Structure formats: structure tokens, C-alpha cells
Amino acid sequence: MAGRIPQSFIEDLIDRVDILDLISSRLDVKKAGKSHVACCPFHQEKSPSFTVAQDKQFYYCFGCGATGNVLKFIMEFDRLDFLPALELLAQHAGIAIPQIDDPNRQEDRSKREIYSILSDCDRFFRRRLRQHEISKDAINYMKGRGISGKVAAKFGIGYAPQGWDNLIKEEGTDRQRLALLEKSGMLVHRPDENKRYDRFRHRIVFPIRDQRGRTVGFGGRVLDESKPKYLNSPETAVFQKARELYGLYEARRASNRLSELIIVEGYMDVISLAQFGIINCVATLGTAITDQHVKKIFRNVSDIIFCFDGDHAGRRAAARAIDTVLPQMNDGLSARFLFLPDAEDPDTMVRTSGKEAFLEMVANALPLSEFFFSHYSADIDTSTPDGKAKLAKSCAPQINKIPEGIFKKLMLAKLSELTGVLTSDLHKYLKSYEAKPNLTERDPEIDRSIDSPDREYPEYYHSKSQNFTEVRHATQPAEKKILFSPIKYLIGLLINFPKLISYTTDTALMEKSSDSEIKLFLELTKTIKDNPDFNPSRSIECWKGDPKLLNKAIYIEPLVAHEIYSSHSNSERDNISAFCDALKHIRCQLFDTLPDSLKAHHLLKQDVLNEKEIKQLHNIYITLFDGDKDLKKAIKQRLVSDQKYNK
């Protein structure tokens, strides 16, 4: 696309497309009260827990927690990146996507030029492969590996001929194109020797494509004894090895309903398995598996199979994969581990044993849970108390990386079974590993606040909770609890019911706080006051488009249409009362952290004091040092004027 898409267009497009209409075109949606329900497409279930709130233009799944607006649904359901999803949404609405000039236009133009030159290089390599008089070594190699012309064409395999400057002569026709070849990593430039030469020479070349099918780099396999055996493009503005997966584009083209992906080591493993009809394979590009790889895979499928060699190096790689995948293991996702016999790789296994035998090995791959406990207990004698304690200490911080949900509970239950430690005690042990939320860096003074014994607290959080509060589920108060801090609960109320803004009063203490969540709440109140037609869905998409506001969007989005703010829950709770109580609680919490002198100044500024506040002022008067004569005098005058404490 030539320019940046106007944010106003994105917002209008989201408003124009009715989420119920679009989701109904993909799912069997049925009306249930004010909302509509369906079986969730993002996890397996028999009873529908996926809710579409037409009035809020949001969806929410009570089973797996999936939530978002119409644009996010398209991205998740159709497995598309932002731009392709936006294009599909615009097509659904029957409108064209406008563009505007962008301050980053130069950077975009540079990337487009790199994509263009890489596409030209891709065509060059494929043309050379078809010139049999120069590519016979490459053709013979692929025939020897059993690669058909059809599969070679599917993966766009090409050939970089012998010689130092074949590509340069063909594609580097002027200074600008020479510069692009260098910028895209296709040639090596040695300024000290004033030399330029092709990076890929006498190699079979594999184009590396992104999810949109654009060539972003190449891998090359040598056809003689040169080193290195495999060579990748260097990282560029369009190619980062930690993000890209070889074969993902081809796998998605082969089937739009993939359920699992097998991660193998190299290009030839992917291609050989495809030759045998196993199309759901991808490979990393000479790097260990990263969290970006895992996130990308889980956006496309719900099941990952890690395929490793059975030797010591393969086991070490599998252990690293555990660390990478655990933080992404939300309920409904699965990871398994397949270890091949010694001296075997996927290519040789499928050739010697056949497709069915290989797929049977995949089906019998170790579940993450089984491999996890096998790995961490390998050198521990779990028959002794010492060994069980060691196992618990090794496993607990790793299990704590798993997102909250059923899988985490089951892993804890298994650890409890292996060690004999009660699950409740393991939960307490995990707390020592809990990290503070990324968004919030709380004021230590606030965290040290002591609750006043005579304070009244709303029912939706525990009076003694300082950092978090227990929000009880409406229908199961004794069993299902959701942990929210008072300020987070308050933000959720305001984002779901913007009309509550009229009850936001007396924020003086909040405005002096350094707590980032309180600052976020105040920003939100200003946004709603400045925008009477405030729409949470539209605003979140706007914030996502601004890197400075991305954390804000990530924090707020799960609160929109959260189950505790649903119409069912709110039918039993007065939102106004809940909002005012939460706001009052936060003000009291902030007030308690103040030194006595500042408490007094705050109370003296109030037009009217209630009985409790008068008592507080009197207690401050008694405890103040005589050096604060002016303040004591002001307090005394206020108490006398109130005629309740006339000394």
C-alpha cells in the first residue's frame, strides 16, 4: 500500500460492519437473551460459551477468554495479519481503503523497494534452475532427494549459478539497484577491496516468504564442498530470523483449516515431508525457537509438535523449547514433543519408514506435561523427601510462567501428585515467584497503607486486600473468583459504562498519585469527557495504532465485555453504587498513605465534613507537634466552626 491508512477510516469501518452480521456468516449463532451465543471457534467445546454482544460490538468467550471487536475476530478466525484483515473487512462493507501521506512514508518506500528487488532475485533464481545446461547439478541433487518438479515449484526453489557476479550482472543494472541488492543482503560489498559479489553462488536457493507470500530473504544449500553447508540471508529491514518460519506460507496455502504444525530443523525436512503429502511443517531459520515463533504458530493452529533429534543436543533444544512455549500455553492450546531415533531426521525417517509410520510417531508424540515432568525429574530421586522438595523447587517457577487457567491448575495437581505437597500449599509457594504486572509500578507508600478498622467496603472486593481484590462471580460466589484491584475494577466499569463519568468527583488525591493505573483511569475520564460519543471498541483500535498507547490498549481490551460487567452480572448490582463505592475506596486508600499534615490540609479544603472526617481531623489535631502552630490553629478554627468539638 502506498501510504498509511487514516485512523478515522479504520474507526468508521469498524463502526460500519455489524459484528453479529459478520460472525453469523462464519458461525452458527443463536439468540440468548440480550446477546447471541455460539460454540467458540477458538477452542473445542460442546456447549456454546462464545457470546456476541451486538450493543457493544464485541465478542467474548467464557470458556477460553477470547475477546475483541469485529477486526480482531477477522484476524483470529481467518488467521490474517492486520492489513489483510482490514482489506477483507473493507471488502465486506463494499468500500475502498483510502490512504494519506505518512511521516514514515520514506521507510515504507524503502521496504517496498527491498520487497521488489527480492522478488526480482526470486525470479532470477527460478529462471536459472530451468536452464538445464547450467543447473544440472542442482536438478540431479533434487532428483536424488526425491523432490518432484511440482513440489519444487510449490516452494519456489531456484538455483544460484557458479560465478561471482551472475546476479549483479542481471539485476544490478544501475547504482540504485546495486544499492538495493546490498540493502536486501543479496550481494556482499567489501569497500576496503572495492569488491562486490553475489552472496549465493552454486547453491540450491529456497525463498523465505512471509505470511503474505512476499519474499523476504533466501536460504541456500551448497552443491559442492564449500562452507557453510547452509547459508541464510542476513537480517534486513524486512527479514528477522526470530520472527519468520520457513514453510508457514506454503502450509497455509495448502489448507485453510490447519489444526497442528510440526516444527522441524531445516528447509529440506519441510520439503521432503511435503513431497510425502505432510504439508503442515515449518522450520526455524538457523535459530532456536523464539516466543515470536510460538505466538505466530498459535495464531494459526492450536497444536504444536516440536520435532527433535533424539541425541543430547536435541534434548537440550527441547528443554529450551519448554521455556519458550510455557508462557504461551493458554487453555485450548497444546504442545507435544517428538524425538527421532539417533542419526535420523524427518527427511530420512519419512523416506525409510514411509508417511504412515511418520504420522504415527507424530500422533504418539509426548504431551508437554509428560515431557516437562520427565525432563525436570531426570536427575532427581523422587522417592525421598529431599528429592521431592528439589522437584517442587525446580518445577514451581516454570509452572508459574503458564497463564492462569485449567492447564496451569492441572500442572500443579500433577506436581502435587509427584511430590505429595498439597495443591493449596503449592499455590502459596508460587506466590514467591509472581512478578508484578508490566503496566503497573505501584507506589510503595500506597502498598503499605493500613485499612481503617471502621471503613465500609463494597462487596466485590475483600477489605484487607491491598494490591488485588477478589471479585466474586455472580452465580458462584463461594467457588469462582476473579482477581482485580479496586482501580482495575473501576476502569472496567467506566470503559463498559461510559455514562458513569458523571459520577467521577473529587479526584484531587488521585491526581497527585504516581500509580500508573490511577493515571490511566484519569486519562480515560478525560478522554470520555472530551468525547461524548466515546466508543470503547473504536478507541482501542485507535490506541493499538499508536506505539505509545499500545500498552493502554492491551491493558483495557480484556476488560471490555468481561463477564463481571455483563448484563447478567449487572442485573444484580447497581453500577452507579458500585462505581461510587470503588472510587471512595481508592480515595480512602490514598488518604491513608498521607502524612498527618497533608491529611489535615486535604480535610480543611473540603466544604463539608462528615462525622468520620471530623473525628479524623480531631485525632490529627491531638497528634500534631507543637511546631505546626499555624496548622493546629486552622484545624481548631474548623472544629470550632463545626460546633462539634468546641474546646
Image (tube, rainbow, N blue to C red):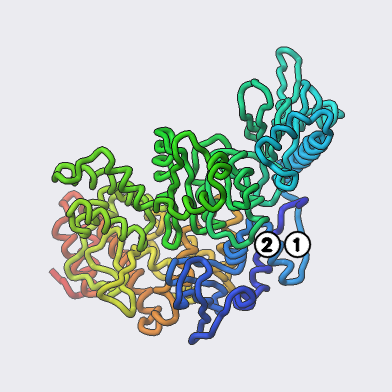
Secondary element at image label 1: loop
- Give the x, y percent position of residue 117: 78, 37
- Give the x, y percent position of residue 16: 68, 73
Q: Is there any visible trace of residue 403 in the rendered image?
A: yes
Q: Of residues 48 and 630, which is closer to you in this image?
A: 48
- Relative placement, left or right, of 406 versus 383 is right
Q: Amino acid at mark 1?
A: Ile
Q: How many marks?
A: 2
Which residue extends farthest right? 173
- Give the x, y percent position of residue 382: 19, 45
Q: Residue at x 60, y 46 (%)?
A: 273
- Give the x, y percent position of residue 180: 76, 32
Q: Residue at x 16, y 46 (%)?
A: 383
Secondary element at image label 2: helix
Q: Amino acid at mark 2?
A: Leu
Image quadrant of residue 74?
bottom right
Q: Residue at x 75, y 25 (%)?
A: 198
- Relative placement, left or right, of 516 versus 550 is left
Q: Residue at x 65, y 37 (%)?
A: 145
Q: Of residues 642 and 61, which is closer to you in this image?
A: 61
Label whose residue precedes the other's in the sequence (1 or 2)? 2
Which numbered marker is on residue 97?
A: 1
Query: As displayed, is residue 165 above or below residue 268?
Result: above
Q: Which residue is mark 2?
A: 86
- Spatial CA distance of label 1 from label 2 is 9 Å
Q: Do callouts 1 and 2 mark residues in contact (Cβ within 8 Å)?
A: yes
User: Which dot, 1 or 2, sits closer to the camera?
Assistant: 2
Query: As displayed, is residue 484 above or below residue 563?
Result: above
Which residue extends farthest top? 193
Q: Residues within 10 Å of mark 1 (few under 14, many from 20)?
A: some
